[in-house]
Amino acid sequence: MNQNNALANRFRGYYPVIIDVETGGFNADTDGLLEIAAVPLTLLANGELAPLPALHAHIYPFEGAVLNPEALKFTGIDPFNPLRNAQPEKEALRVMFNELKKNQRDEDCKRCILVGHNAHFDLQFLKAAIDRNNLKNCNPFHPFSVFDTVSLAGLAFGQTVLAKACASAGIDFNNDEAHSALYDAQKTAELFCLIVNRWQALGGFDNNLSNDQVGS
């Protein structure tokens, strides 16, 4: 690993990627994955963390997937609407993973780590789709470690709901656009970057220290 790469040093060699999914329910093994968005991150010249352009896909539910009517009403998704231009899971995830691996390599990081709001929900749906489609060798993500903005926002702002945490952080949030994987991932990325940058500005982390200096 190139020790001069500040992002590689910042998260112990892991490359943070914000992930949000929209689904047909709460059971990752049985319920359909309908939409996924990923927001990779970078460090600016001033040392601040910032979002890169998002990757996004509408996904056609896998054969036999459970689609809970209440979940579809909540998200407003019509899984079979042809205007969605939905892709099969395997195709969508393979393309997304390949792009994220490029970002990861560019930053000299050893693996991606999922950042999410209620991150283990997103991780479980992602892992179930990986298993269904035999994509284990393509998967760039750590199998269980995550950064969860629920905990971080609770610590920083006393809020755990994404909309309320964004409001407390001074981030614009439109409830009419919420529950879209793309919108929620972008807002989660803004929130995560703001918290990390504010912590660094307060002296909480020194990007000049290598992982060898701070311990493993």
Image (cartoon, helix red, strand yellow):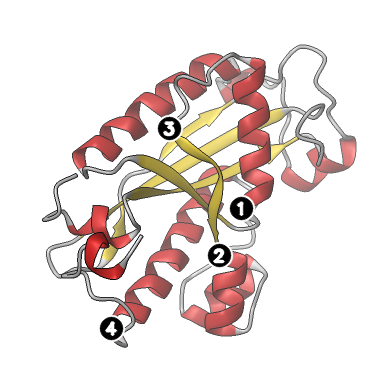
Is residue 87 in sight in this rendering?
A: no
Q: Which residue is mark 2?
A: 149
Residues marked 1 and 2 touching at CB (< 8 Å): yes
> Which SS class for mark 1?
helix
Q: Which residue is mark 1?
A: 119
Which disc is residue 201 wearing?
A: 4
Q: Residue furthest bottom?
A: 202
Q: CA distance from mark 2 to mark 4?
A: 19 Å
Which residue is at a point 58% across and 20% down the rendered structure image?
86
Which amino acid does the dot numbered 2 rest on?
Thr
Rendered location of residue 12, percent (x, y) = 34, 56
Residue 95 image-quadrant placement = top left
Residues marked 4 and 3 touching at CB (< 8 Å): no
Q: Is residue 177 left or right of residue 32?
A: left
Rendered location of residue 186, percent (x, y) = 46, 54
Which disc is residue 140 wearing?
A: 3
Which amino acid does the dot numbered 1 rest on?
Ala
Near mark 2 (Cα within 10 A), the count class, few <14, some 14-19 or many ≥20, is: many
**Eye-nearest disc, 3 or 1:** 3
> Which SS class for mark 4?
helix
Q: Is residue 101 left or right of residue 147?
A: left
**Eye-nearest disc, 3 or 2:** 3
Q: CA distance from mark 3 to mark 1?
A: 16 Å
- Taking depth in this image into account, of 191 and 138 the one nearest to the observer is 138
Check the picture and name the quadrant holding the N terminus: top left
Which circle's residue, 2 or 4, is located before the other in the chain? 2
Which residue is at a point 32% across and 40% down the rendered structure image?
110
Which circle's residue, 3 or 2, is located before the other in the chain? 3
